[in-house]
Amino acid sequence: MTSLQLHNLKKRFGSTEVIRGVDLAIEDGEFVVFVGPSGCGKSTLLRMISGLEDITEGELYIGDRLINDVQAAQRGVAMVFQSYALYPHLTVRQNMGFGLKVRKVPADEAEQRVNEAAASLKLEALLHRYPRELSGGQRQRVAIGRAIVGHPQVFLFDEPLSNLDAELRVHMRAEIAALHKKLGNTMVYVTHDQIEAMTLADKIVVLRDGLIEQVGTPRELYERPGNLFVAQFIGSPRMNVLPAASVERQFAAYGLKIGSAHGVGMRPEHLSVVYTGAGMLRGTVLISEYTGAATLLHIELESGETALVIHNGQNTPQVDDAVALAIDPENLHFFDEKGQAIRPLRRAA
Ligand SMILES: Nc1ncnc2c1ncn2[C@@H]1O[C@H](COP(=O)(O)OP(=O)(O)OP(=O)(O)O)[C@@H](O)[C@H]1O
């Protein structure tokens, strides 16, 4: 059993509490991604699981074993860092085998494990090289290989792809997904990258200021955010949220009642530009950003608010054009004055 249970976990540095009571259950074999704004405590929480940071309060179980006071090396976890943390004076083979040597795994078994990991990560031809002779992606693969050879129960990844260029990130992301499929281990992954979170996670944990805001599948968080913070954190560009008062009249014309909602959320990809004048909202194009596959339009609405719209059809409007915007009411999100989601109109598929 390699499930993880976090019970009211807290971390204080001096008098500052940076993890303020986290309860979380991670299932055996699950791929869980921690996201949240810079400084919210993602890395600290991961380091508490790894044993690199001690736990101020609360309980942490791996399987049914309480591991608060178990040393990092005895927890059955392996961590992969953003910085790779390879030994520059050791070859790829030596780097991958180093931990096994320290743990006095017999040499022939260690060699076999390194060979197996090298084969699954396509590193066989590079085993004799030194880290300086490798590309960033190859280095990160070695760092992952070093984690694999220890046969950990749980893999922990702290922004492992942040130092790679865009193309390599896409490639390595797919490799990590394939690795999870193949090994089936429990994995916990910290990232800033929305696409990584959405594509890799079975479950995303959104953290803010040392607390969990919402836990759910990528689809649940995207389609049914529980509050304004999650609504605007998940999805890029972020969800437009307009004061209910500024759209009430226009919506009423379409038979839509805003009710007690304080804010109305509309994702940029759900708004479409219409030319017939039949849109719910009207405005003028302020900025038009062509990105190849789509154009991001900044629309100044009649109410004075600005809305972002992803336009990927023909007839892209130009700056200063007057446009109308339409949205399927199913795609509207409503929030109360405290920012909590109300009247969810959509069901996650
Ligand atoms: N050793 C430390 N001593 C004091 N404060 C710390 C220490 N490590 C982290 N912190 C503080 O704890 C908070 C959480 O830091 P953490 O690195 O976990 O955030 P994060 O969400 O991973 O941020 P980022 O996305 O920027 O990496 C921050 O306010 C940080 O300054």
Image (cartoon, rainbow, N blue to C red):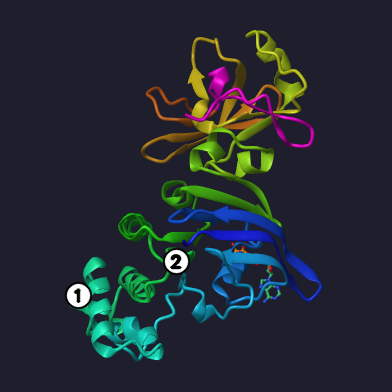
In the displayed structure image, the side of residue 113 where residue 309 appears, left or right: right
Instruction: Indicate whether 13 appears above or below 224.
Output: below
Q: Which residue is mark 2?
A: 155
Instruction: Indicate whether 143 appears above or below 281.
Output: below
Q: Residue at position x 48%, y 66% from top? A: 156
Residue 255 in view (yes/no) = yes
Work out which residue is located at the far front of the displayed protein and give it.
64
Q: Which mark is residue 291?
A: none
Residue type, numbered disc 1: Glu
Q: Position of residue 218 (x, y in %)?
A: 50, 42
Closer-to-camera residue (269/276) = 269
Work out which residue is located at the far right of the displayed protein and give it.
15
Work out whether mark 1 precedes mark 2 in sequence or the reverse, and give the earlier one: 1
The magenta stretch is 320-349
Give the crowd class for mark 1: few <14, some 14-19, many >=20 residues within 10 Å: some
Give the crowd class for mark 2: few <14, some 14-19, many >=20 residues within 10 Å: many
> In which quadrant of the rendered view does residue 20 lie?
bottom right
Is residue 345 covered in magenta? Answer: yes
Q: Residue at position x 56%, y 14% from top? A: 279
In the displayed structure image, the side of residue 138 where residue 66 appears, left or right: right
Q: Secondary structure at mark 2?
A: strand
Q: Residue at position x 45%, y 60% from top? A: 187
Closer-to-camera residue (123/181) = 181
Instruction: Indicate whether 37 appears above or below 82.
Output: above
Instruction: Indicate whether 327 appears above or below 305.
Output: above
Q: Secondary structure at mark 1?
A: helix
Residue type, numbered disc 2: Phe
Residue labelled 1 has its Cβ within 8 Å of some atom of ligand 1: no
